[in-house]
Image (spheres, rainbow, N blue to C red):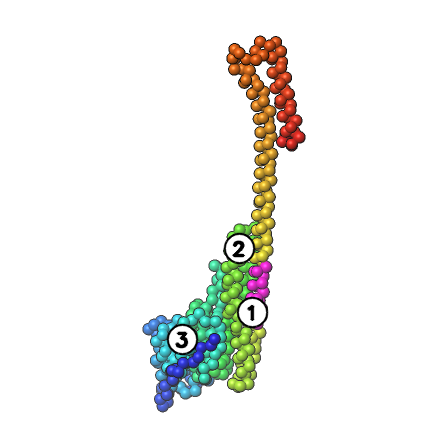
Amino acid sequence: MPRSPRRHHWRRRPAPPAEPRPADTAPGSEPPAAPPVRDEHGSVVQAVLYRDGRRVAAPESLAEAFHQLRRYPGGMAWIGLHRPSEAELHSLAAEFDLHELAVEDALEAHQRPKLERYGDTLFVVLRAARYLDAQEEVDFGELHVFVGKDFLITVRHGAAPDLSAVRHRMEETPELLALGPEAVLYAILDAVVDGYAPVVSGVQNDIDEIETEVFGGDPAVSRRIYELAREMVEFQRATRPLVAMLHALMAGFAKYGTQEELQRHLRDVADHVTHTSERVDGFRQALADILTVNATLVTQQQNAEMRALAEAGFEQNEEIKKISSWAAILFAPTLVGTIYGMNFDNMPELHWAGGYPFAILLMAVVCTSLYVIFKKRDWL
């Protein structure tokens, strides 16, 4: 159930009268590019002001960024943060009239991709991904974007995506950057979606390797299938909502007067994310099928092992039968000979002339009878 908006939210402070442009910055000129800056908390990755698609200032702190934005009316502030503190986000909320629910989401992170509009501010949550070749696993990052009329704020939680490349590409195309914060948002969406392509390739290679391991009888493959399936669940959570988000943005083209160039750009991004989402769905199904095949192969292998053990046990029983049969046959004459070898004086047939032949004949009859009996029972 969606949360109901709270009564209190921050309001943007009124801008003071525009101050005269510094003497060392002529209209339309571009100050030298500044390296990425970090404030005292180490979370401000870059804060840059643009006017007509060109860099006009690179403040070194949030306070200076607010001040510089008022000095350049008609400009755009692009502020990049990485795991900011609560105080930093609250100062941004007070300056740019950010809704407290969006600020709360940006602080807590662990959000699913979504698109929400709070008045004139658009709040976007994205899940970026990158494939780590060494670990053969997918690493997910989270990105929160606040888009207003004259500002764009990015809040990163994780290593991905690399927004410095996006900033560099946008600064190389000032005509696109001049279209405003929406153009930057679409460029960020494009970068996030393009970042999915190496992940798709890496996962496809993993699945190919898993198929080889499954049919090769690797006992550790079940764990790898399970771990990759979990990553695909996370990947699906990152890509599937993004399809609906992009269609929602495209539905607002006419209402918000989106430039034709941005419309084409966003349609291209939507095509790519739809393709990626379909591939991820295919991966999940493929992993489910592979897991079923692996379970079947494991069961067959266990049955074969049980059959081999049963056959070995049967053969062992047959050998025990043979040994027992011969032991019984040899025991009969031993028993007769033992009885007549006790040398008692009062024994029957002790002085009988036919005693010895009778004993031999008795032994032969008993042994032959036992042999015939065991032979009929297939013990010999």
Q: Where does the magenta region start and end? A: 274-289
Question: Callout 1: helix, strand or loop?
Answer: helix
* Residue 204 coordinates in the image, percent (x, y): 56, 62
Q: Please identify, in this view, whether the residue under mark 1 or under mark 2 is nearer the observer.
A: 2
Query: Dividing the picture into quarters, in which one does residue 356 lie?
Result: top right
* Residue 95 coordinates in the image, percent (x, y): 38, 82
Q: CA distance from mark 2 to mark 3?
A: 40 Å
Kindly identify which residue carries mark 2: 222
Q: Is residue 166 visible?
A: no
Q: Is mark 2 in CB contact (under 8 Å) with mark 3?
A: no
Q: Residues within 10 Å of mark 1 (few under 14, many from 20)?
A: many
Q: Earlier in the sequence, mark 1 or mark 2?
A: 2
Dominant SS type (magenta): helix
* Residue 106 coordinates in the image, percent (x, y): 42, 74
What residue is drawn where x is 59% and y is 41%?
310
Kindly identify which residue carries mark 3: 104
Between 199 and 346, the one nearer to me in the picture = 346
